[in-house]
Amino acid sequence: MALLKRYGLYMVAAAFFFYMFYSLSFPYESAPPPQPGHNDADDAPINEAPKGDGRKSYDWSKIPIQHPVVSDMIPLPTGAPKALPKIQHEFKEEDPTAKHIRETRREEVKKQFLKCWTSYRQKAWMHDELEPISGKATDPFGGWAATLVDAMDTLWIMDLKEEFTSAVTDIGKIDFGYTPAEKINVFETTIRHLGGLLAAYELSGEERLLKKAKEVGEMLYHAFDTPNRMPITRWDFHNAGQGNKQEADETVLVAEIGSLTMEFTRLSQLTKDPKWYDAITRITQVFDRQQDMTKLRGMWPIVVNAKKRDFTKDTSFTIAAMADSTYEYFAKTYALLGGLDPVYKKLYEQSMDTAIKHTLFRPMTPENADMLMSGMVRTEGTNTMLLPEMQHLVCYAGGMFALGGKIFENPEHVTIGRKLTDTCVWAYKASPAGIMPEVSQLYKCANMSDCTWDEKAWKEEVARRADVGNEDDPLKNIANLRLPLGFTAINDRRYILRPEAIESVFIMYRITGLQQWQAAAWDMFTAIQKHTDTDLGNAALADVSADNPPKVDSMESFWMAETLKYFYLIFSEPDVISLDDYVFNTEAHPFKIPKPKN
Ligand code: DMJ
């Protein structure tokens, strides 16, 4: 028991450390100064970066590769794509009242998007983010107009074509050969910039966007120029630009090395140049070879060693923060490759078997709801310990299981997806602001099949965790903790406009056709809107357990790229970006699924 307590505390501390590390959105080492705005030169030719300020801009396509792939370039799989099983529900004709409500809600979402976009355009154009309270601009993602690039496909989907067309011209002016930042986060640049450009290209057919995506691809390819061809995930851009030697790191977050597959595969498919597919396939091969060799077989630890190509040593496992999209991408990459590479099916199925067995738990709730959550596991020898944590970030997992269950015809996974999503919806409702916090702990049922609410036991667990005991009554200080029933701790009370809950709710809706998901989405949207709306856009919140959560002057690019897109799509006709036609990358950028010719 003492050991469990000690490790329990260690896990919380470790989880918190990792979480802080991750949740700061991978900041660059020093905040880069803002770049000059370029909105006065709408007629400049595409792909011509602003010149004349004396700064160095690398032409990545011309910088020699020091560790080239010469004779063993891995080609894209050939052959006709397979037909995947039907993913979406067969929607029937809509009742006129339901249609009216749905369209009204959709327009509310669009109106809010347009407000954010207009403010960004007026006050932070060509910068990464707008600060939605002060109206200042900020550049935490290399200074490459992250919000602009990330939101392009949302503009298209929302039928804001004029705004889209005018933005394309300015995208051409982004200089991916230059950054004032010292280091670049390869994962973030891949999912936001490369993913955003590829999806916007696919939707619009605008060739200039593909050209720009290729420019990003040429840059990122240099992060793979190491002796073992493993990428440097926190990459010294200038070191590489000057042609210096580089090698992969020994400590890498598994999400950052495992979640490049969709974007690199798509870039190769669209350009017909296999080098990006080759680059990520070498990582996939390591995942495949070592899947059975880790301390929790089937899954890989949160931290892996890219320099030694050893993904087996560490002892903390999760499908949540720092690992998440690695798992999310297996089934999606399988679909993107037209079902032609069975390794992604194997990676998905074996990792999910382990995740189901070791990370899932049933939270105890006053409603005795039959729901699931996925926590963090630590191994010690043959023992495993589960921390019953709930992160906003892990709410993507409901959608992942449901989609994977459809793609691989596994109804149990669809049910698990539903139960995981139910917990996120419940957590939104349980919070005073109607929005779930970043990280919390739940009371884990001892038994998955039979779990009756036990308020006394819950209170004792809260008191134990919070150490609120005093001599007279160990339970009396619980009210001060502001914990919804069923929560045993809240480690991080923020909401930073994240999308994962609405992402899974959207997927559940498209798969089941049940209107309960649209109702849940509307409750979530109204709560978020009520508390985060500012004169210029939407602001992150410092504490969702307060009745009136204080606002924080931050609006990450994923708000317009992901959160508002999913809210818009759940209130759109089901054939708008159908899940039978598209897979979304982890930043909600849709890529087209190849189909067999008939
Ligand atoms: C996004 O950048 C992506 O969804 C990523 O996979 C996780 N974090 C944010 C959103 O919360």
Image: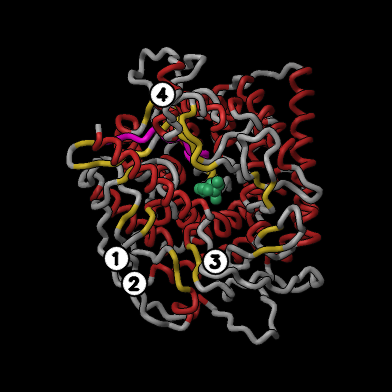
345 shown above or below 261: above
Secondary structure of the residue carrying tag 2 is: loop
| Amino acid at circle 2 | Glu
**Residue 342: quarter of image:** top left
* 3D distance between C-alphas at marks 1 and 2: 7 Å
The earlier-in-sequence mark between 1 and 2 is 2
User: Circle 4 sits on which residue?
Assistant: 460
In front: label 2 or label 4: 4
* 3D distance between C-alphas at marks 3 and 4: 53 Å
Residue at 39% from the left image edge and 67% from the top image edge: 224
Picture disc at residue 216: 3
User: Circle 2 sits on which residue?
Assistant: 247
| Amino acid at circle 4 | Glu
Residues at discs 1 and 4 in contact (Cβ within 8 Å): no
Residues at discs 1 and 2 in contact (Cβ within 8 Å): yes
Q: Is residue 116 left or right of residue 18?
A: right
